[in-house]
Image (cartoon, rainbow, N blue to C red):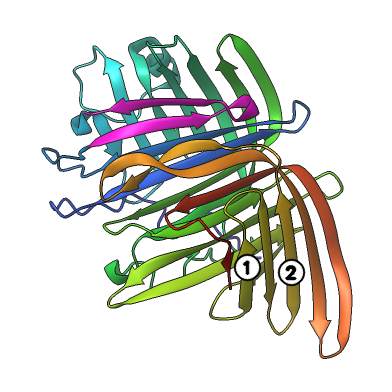
Amino acid sequence: MKTYSLQTPHTGYHWDGSDRRFFEGWYYRVTLPEEKQTFAFMYSIEDPIGGKPNSGGGAQILGPNDEYLCRTFPDVKKFWATPGVLELGHWGQTNLTSPVGYLDPQVFEYKIKQGYQATATWHQGVIWDPGTNNYCRWQYKTQPIYGWGNPDAIQQSTAGGLSFLPIFEPGWQILMAHGLATGWIEWNGCIYKFTNAPAYSEKNWGGAFPKKWFWLNCNSFYDASDLALTAGGGKRGVLWWMEKVALVGIHYQGKFYEFVPWNSEVYWQIQPWGEWQIQAKNDLFEVELSATTNHSGTLLRAPSEQGLIFLCRDTMHGHLTLKLREVRDSYSKLILEARSDLCGLEVGGSSWEQPWIK
C-alpha cells in the first residue's frame, strides 16, 4: 500500500528575493484540555529585503486566559527560512556571529536570548518584554496526524490549485490540521508540561493584504476524538474585483470533509464580535457551525499596508457546536455532533460595524 507524506503544498518560504511588498506569517497552536488553556504562537516577516519602512519581524503569543505577549525583531538579516520545507527562525538577541539557521536545541537554548525556531516537528523559543518583565519560553516536539486532505492521498492546497498566483494573494495554507505535541511551555514562571496535546499550524503570505476576515479553529472536543476543524472566510482584491470566499475543512477519523467555493455552497453570519454561524453544503455532506464567546477577546497585530499593526481580535475560549450530516436527495443522516469550549475565534480587518452576512 502506498504511503503519502503529510507535507502540504506551500510549506516552504515564498519570498523570491525581490524588493516588492511582501509578508509571510506562521501560526502554531497547542491546546491543553486539562488546563482548559491554549497557547498560540504567531511569527511574521515583512519586506525581508530590508531597508523598507516596514522591514522587520515579530513574534506574538496568545497565552493563558487570552493574555498577550509580543516582541519585534527589526533585523531581517537575523531571520531565516527554507524554501522547500517548513523551517524558520529569528535570532532576536544573541552574540552568535555564525550564519543564521537551525541550531541544535541545546545550542539554541544556551545562545539565543530572544528568538524562536520552528519546523514541522520541533518548536522552540524565548521572548521577554523588558517593560513588564513578562516572558515565555517553550520547547516541544510534534507528531503530525493530519496535513490538509485525506491522509492516504497527496495533501492539498487549502485555497486551491491556483493559490500560488500573485493575483490570489494573500495565500493561506493549513500546514497541520491536527498533531500531537509533547514538551513544555513556561509562562511568567508557571510551567505547563504536556504529552500528546492537540497541536495545529498554518501560514499565510503575499504582497497584498486581506480587507476583512473571520476564522475558527478547534481540535479538542468534549465528545469526539480524532477530530479537527478549521473554517475561515475573507474579502480580498483579485485583479479589478473584490472576492468574498469562505471554506470549512474537517478531519474526522481518517477522512477529510472539504467545503470550498468550487465544490460547495458556503454561507455565514458573523457578528462584529461574539457570534460566528457558518453553514456549508455540497452533493454529499452538509455542516453547521455555531460558535459564541462571552470573552472580550484580545487585540492582535497583523501585517498590513501600514506594517504590523493591531488589526484583529481573538479568543481561544470559544464555545463551538459542530454538526456534520450525510445528505442524498431527501435523505439526511447525522454523522457527528461535537462540542468544545476551546475553539479559537477571530475577526479581522475593517468594516466590522455591522454583522457580515452572506
Q: CA distance from mark 1 to mark 2?
A: 12 Å
Q: Main secondary structure of the magenta part?
A: strand
Image coords of residue 355 (percent x, y): 58, 61
Please provide the residue range marked out in magenta. 56-74
In the image, residue 344 sits, relative to residue 196, either above or below, namely below
Q: Secondary structure at mark 1?
A: strand
Where residue 52 appears, as percent x and y from the top left, is: 13, 41
| Amino acid type, mark 1 | Trp
- Residue at (85, 67) in percent of width and height: 335
Position of residue 257 relative to residue 295, above or below, is below
Of the pair 196 and 321, the residue shown nearer to us: 321
Mark 1, other Cα within 10 Å: few <14 / some 14–19 / many ≥20: many
The correct choice, above or below, for 170 with respect to 306 in the image is below
Residue at the spot of label 1 = 268
Q: Which residue is mark 2?
A: 287
270 with respect to 175 (left or right): right
Does the stretch in magenta take in 67? yes
Q: Earlier in the sequence, mark 1 or mark 2?
A: 1
Picture quadrant where residue 254 is located: bottom right
Q: Residue furthest bottom?
A: 329
Instruction: Tell us which disc is closer to us: 1 or 2.
Output: 1
| Circle number at residue 28 | none
Of 211 and 109, nearer the camera is 211
Mark 2 secondary-structure assignment = strand
Task: Name the residue rendered at 75%, 33% in the picture.
Answer: 33
Q: Is residue 302 left or right of residue 267?
A: left
